[in-house]
Image (spheres, rainbow, N blue to C red):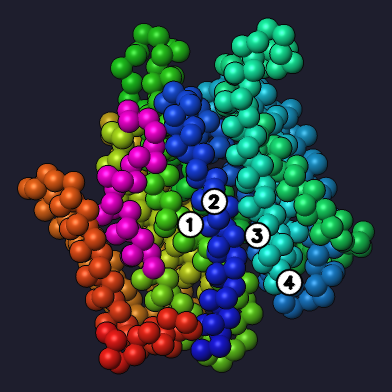
Amino acid sequence: MSSIKKLAGQTIWYGLSSIAARFINYLLTPYLTYKFLDWQYGEMSIVYAFIPFMNVIYTYGMETAFFRFANKADKNNVYNSTSISLIISTVLLSFVLILLQHPLSALLQIKQHPEYLSMAAAIIGLDALTTIPFAKLRQDGRPVKFALTKVGGICINIISVYFFLSVCPTLAKDPNSWVQVWYNKDWAVGYVLLANLIQNIVTLLLLLKQFLGFEWKFDKRLWKEMMIYGLPLIIAGFAGMINETFDRIMLGWWAPVTHKKSVLLAVREAKAQVGIYSACYKLSILITLAVQAFRMGAEPFFFKQSTEENAPRVYARVMKFFVITLCLMFLVVMLYLDLWKNFIRNPAMWKGLKVVPILLLANMFLGIYYSLSIWYKLGNKTLAGAWITLIGAIITLAINYFLIPVYSYMACAWATFACYGSMMVISYIWGQKEYKIPYAWKKLSAYIAISVLLFGLHKLLVSFISSGIFYYASATLILGAFTLFILKIEQKEFQRLPVIGKYLGSSGI
C-alpha cells in the first residue's frame, strides 16, 4: 500500500504540474481558433505535427535510458555522459535541419515560409537541451522546481502569443509606432513559433543550474550501453509520432478538395480540413492530460518498484485506477460535449465534432498501452516496443493512405483508433508471456464498454428530447450513476486509498 501512496504522491505532484502546463497551453486553442482562419490554424498544425518527429530524433531515447541507467549505475556518470551526448547531437542536427529548410518546407506545403523550419530547429534544439535537466528533477524528486519551470514557460508562451497577435496589430496602426518597423500581419503562424522560441529560451534559463551541473567527463562504455538500450526507442518514438501527429501532414497532402483548378485554393482547403481536425482533437484534452500526468509520475516509479517482490500486483492495481479515471473522463467530455465545443471559438470548425468520441477512445487505448509497456522497458527489450509501435504506424499509414481521399479527417480518427487499439492488444498479449502481471482485463474492458454504452444512451435520449435542461440533467444523472457503480464495485480498493478511503466505509456506499 505504501507503494501506491508513493505513486499517488508523485503522480499528483508531477501530474498537477503537467496538467497545469498543458491545460494553460490548451487555453491558446480558443484564442487561436478565434484569431486564425481555419486554413491558418491548419498550417500551424502541420508545423507542430513536424516538430514532434524531430524531437524523437534529437533525444534518441536518452530520457528513458537516463531513468533506466540512473538506477543501476553512478547517477553523476550517467548525467554527465547523457548531457554531453545531447549537446553535441543537438548542435549538429539543428545545423542539418536549417540547411534542409527549403526542401522540407515544400514537402510540408509551407514553401512560402521556409523560415518556419529554421525557427522550429531552434525550438526543438532548446527543447532537447532541457530534456535531461527535467528528467533529473523527476529522478531527484523535485516536483516544485519541475512544476514552476513547466508552468512558467507556458505562461511566457501565452503572454508572447497574445502580444504578437493582439497587442502588436493595434500598435502597428500608428505609423509612428516602433512596432510598425518590423510587424507583419500576414506572418501569423510565425509569431506563434516565435512565442514558442521565447518560451524555450526562458525554460532553459530557469534550468540553467541543472543544465550546467554536469562535468565534461564522458564514459564511452556507459554511453554505448545507453545507446543500445535507447536506439530502438527511436524507432518506437518515430513510429509513435506517425501514429500521433503524421495524420495532419497526410491530411494536408490527400484531403478531398473542391478547388481543383486553383492550386492555392486547393492547398488552403486541405489546410482548413487539417485545422478542423486539429481543433476537434483538442477536445480529448482531459484524457490527454490524464495520460501525460500518469506517464510523468509512473515511469520513474515503475523502475524503482521493479525490485520489489509484489511489483506485478502493484502494476495491476495502478492499471485499474488508471482505467477507471479514463472512463470517467471519457464520460465527462462526451456527456457535456455541447459545453466543451465552445472551447473552439470558430463555429465553422464544429462540423468535425464527430471525431471526438473516436479520438477519446483512441487516446484511452494509448494510455493503457503506456501502462502496459513497462514489461519491455524493465526487461531491456525496447526493441519489442519498437516493433509494436511500428505495427501501429503501418496501420496508421495504410488506413490514412487509402481512406483520407474519400473520408477526409474521419479516416484520420479511425486510423488513430485502430492503431492504438492494436498496440494495446499486442502489448498485453506479448507482455503477459514475458512478464506476467495480473491485470483484471475482463473487468476493465467492461468498464470501458459501459462508458461507451452510457454515452450512446445519452445521445439517444437527447435525440428525442431537445431541451438544454434535459441535456445537462440527464448527463449529470448518468455520470453520477456510473460513479456510484464504480465506487460500489471497487469499494474495498478505494477504502485503501489515502484521504478518500475514510469516507467510503462499509456504511457509506
| Residue type at tag 3 | Ala
| Residue type at tag 1 | Leu
- Mark on residue 140? 4
337 with respect to 65 (left or right): left
Q: Write down the quadrant of residue 503 in the picture.
A: bottom left
- Provide the residue designation for mark 2: 22
Q: Is residue 337 magenta?
A: yes
| Residue type at tag 4 | Asp
* Residue drawn at (47%, 70%) of the image: 372
Question: Rounded to the nearest whole Å, what is the CA distance between mark 1 and mark 2?
Answer: 7 Å
Contact? badges 2 and 3 (CB < 8 Å) = no
- Mark on residue 300? none
- Provide the residue designation for mark 3: 147
* Residue drawn at (72%, 65%) of the image: 137
Q: In the image, which residues are magenta?
A: 325-348
Vertically, is 222 above or below 114?
below
* Residue drawn at (41%, 75%) of the image: 321
Q: Secondary structure at mark 2?
A: helix
- Provide the residue designation for mark 1: 289
Q: Residue furthest left?
A: 464
Q: Nearer the viewer, mark 3 or mark 4?
A: 3
Say which label, 1 or 2, has the lower sequence index. 2
User: Within 10 Å of the Cα at label 2, are there few (<14), some (14-19), or many (20+) other Cα atoms?
Assistant: some
User: Within 10 Å of the Cα at label 3, are there few (<14), some (14-19), or many (20+) other Cα atoms?
Assistant: many
